[in-house]
Structure formats: structure tokens, C-alpha cells
Image (cartoon, rainbow, N blue to C red):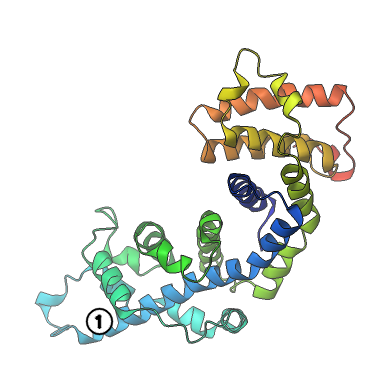
Amino acid sequence: MINRHHLRVKLLQWIFASRQQGQDDFHFVTQQFNSSATLSLRSLVMAFVLLERLLHYANLRDKERPGKLLERNRQLGLGHGLANHPLADILQKDAMYRKALQLCFVEDFEVSSNMLRALFEAINNGKCLGARYGFDDMREITGIKVVFEKCISSGDWYSPWQLEHNLFWDSDRYLIDRQVIQILNKISEGETFPDAEALLKSWQSDDHFVSTMFKELLHDSTVYQPLIESHTGQWDPERLARVDFLILQMACVELSQFPEIPIKVTINEYIELAKVYSTPQSAAFVNGLLDKIKADMLQKGMISKSGRGLVET
């Protein structure tokens, strides 16, 4: 369901949360992580169900608009731009999307009319969109992307709504929001909705990466600590942010345990994680530290790459 970048994000969140809760049974955490895949897929499909229901609601509101053919009513709110939107017809005719609805048991999923009304009104009066978006923008799939990013995923009610149906939503949100946008991009290019069964299998096919990370980092929370601390220089190890420390540990595990992943890929990925999930100074700190750690591990023979892992990217 997710690529390696998404897996790293999700694993960072799960391992950090497990340590916070004192949960060190990596077998249990791995099982829970894998079982969360079906809920993650359901949340992704539910996001599209919400979009589909919103477009249907926009149709109803547009039909109810009194005197809609009169000149004085031609200046419409942005929400009316969603009426008769091409995405609704695309999803209705998309066999893969209908299959995803069945697989996730959300074919008849109901969205509160109060929620749809509030969302429509927020779009209609432009409160969530701002001044740069106009009526014509709403007629395109790119407009739906903007609506999702600015009016739905950033709204106060969306996360609680998803959380009701997915206990792991807090760790899924970043990934699913990105996937919604990616799928909308593909649909705008003429592609179909992705195969839901294939998405689920792709999530579960990387179980070696997942299980290794959990085993190494939950079984012993101090793994690679001496190596990391030996390169902190004047930096007091006690002041090392817990997220930064975990990011560095994950990088060490990946460098040493996965010969097929190029060194540069690993380092770049964990620098990106530090940018998003730690302090503003963390990316530069992690970058400098990983360069020293990598050189030390190579000298000690702790890194051995083969196949695709030998490719310099």
C-alpha cells in the first residue's frame, strides 16, 4: 500500500509511540502494525467516499437554488462549482473504485448531512480556500485537490471523523493525505483508481523491512547508542531529542541490515524525516552526524552493500 518512504514515516511513529508506552514486545507490535493495513486502506477509500458525497451534495444544493437561470444569480459561491463535477462521473464509472468500496465495506457508508452542509458552506463562502481560487478552479480535478487540502484534511472535524473508524489514524494521516492527492493526480491524467487488493498486498509484502526495524529497535532501545554518542562531539547526549535519536538508530539499522538499499538513499530519507518530525535544527544535525556514523560503520565493516545497494544515487 505504501512505498519505502511511507514505511519509514509510519515505522518512526509506531516505534516512538511503542517506546513511550513501554511496549517492547516486537512480535506483538509487528502483528498490530500489519493488521493496521486494512484500516489504512479503508481510511484512504473513505476519503474518496467523502469527496463523492460532497459532489453529490453540491448537485442537490445547485438544483435547489431558486431562480438559478436569472442574471442576478449567476454570481455563484465556489461550492456551486462542484455541482456536476467530472470527478463524480469518473468515480461512478471506475470499476476499480467500485471494487475498493466493496473490499472496504463502505459502499453504503453514510456521511452526516450536517458535516456535508458545513463543508459546502465553508467552500461556498471561500473561508477555507482564500481569495486566490475562483469558480472555474472548482470545475477541475485540481480544484478538488485544493478543496481536500485546504477545506477537508486541515479541518477540525476530519481527523476525529477518520479516527472513529481507524484507531491508527494518527500515524496514518500524513501518508493517506498524500496518497489522496497522488491518486487525484493520476485520475486527472486519465488513470483509473488503484487496485485496492494490490495496494494491500504491497503494504504486507515488505514485512522483512518492518519486522527487522521492530525487532532491532524495540528489543533493545539502546541499540547503536555507543556508536551514535561517540560522534556527538560537544553535544550532550542527554540533550539529544528522542525523535532525533530514534531517527539515527533507524538509519543505523538500515545501513547495516539492508544491503540492497543504497547508502545515499538511507541518509537522505532520514534527513527528510528529521525535517518533518523533529526540531528546525535537527535536519542539519542529523545530516552531519550520519556522515560521521556512515564513515565509522564503513571502516568497521558494519556496512556491506550488494545489488541495487551499490548504486550511487
Residue 8 makes an appearance in the image: yes
Residue 195 makes an appearance in the image: no
Q: Could you tell me which secondary element the residue under label 1 belongs to?
A: helix
Q: Where is residue 309 in the image (x, y as percent from the top left)?
A: 83, 41
**Quadrant position of the N terminus in the picture:** bottom right
**Quadrant position of the C terminus in the picture:** top right
Quarter of the image holding residue 73? bottom left
Q: Mark 1 highlights which residue?
A: 61
Taking the spot 66% from the left edge, 19% from the top edge, the residue there is 232
Q: Position of residue 124 (x, y in %)?
A: 24, 68
Q: 226 left or right of 122?
A: right
Taking the spot 52% from the left edge, 61% from the top edge, the residue there is 169
Image vertical order of residue 31 relative to residue 15, above or below = below
Q: 215 left or right of 60?
A: right
Image vertical order of residue 108 relative to residue 144, above or below = below
Counting other residues with Cα less than 10 Å from the Cα at mark 1, is it few (<14), some (14-19), or many (20 or more)?
A: some
Work out whether residue 131 or residue 45 is closer to the camera in this orientation and state it: 45
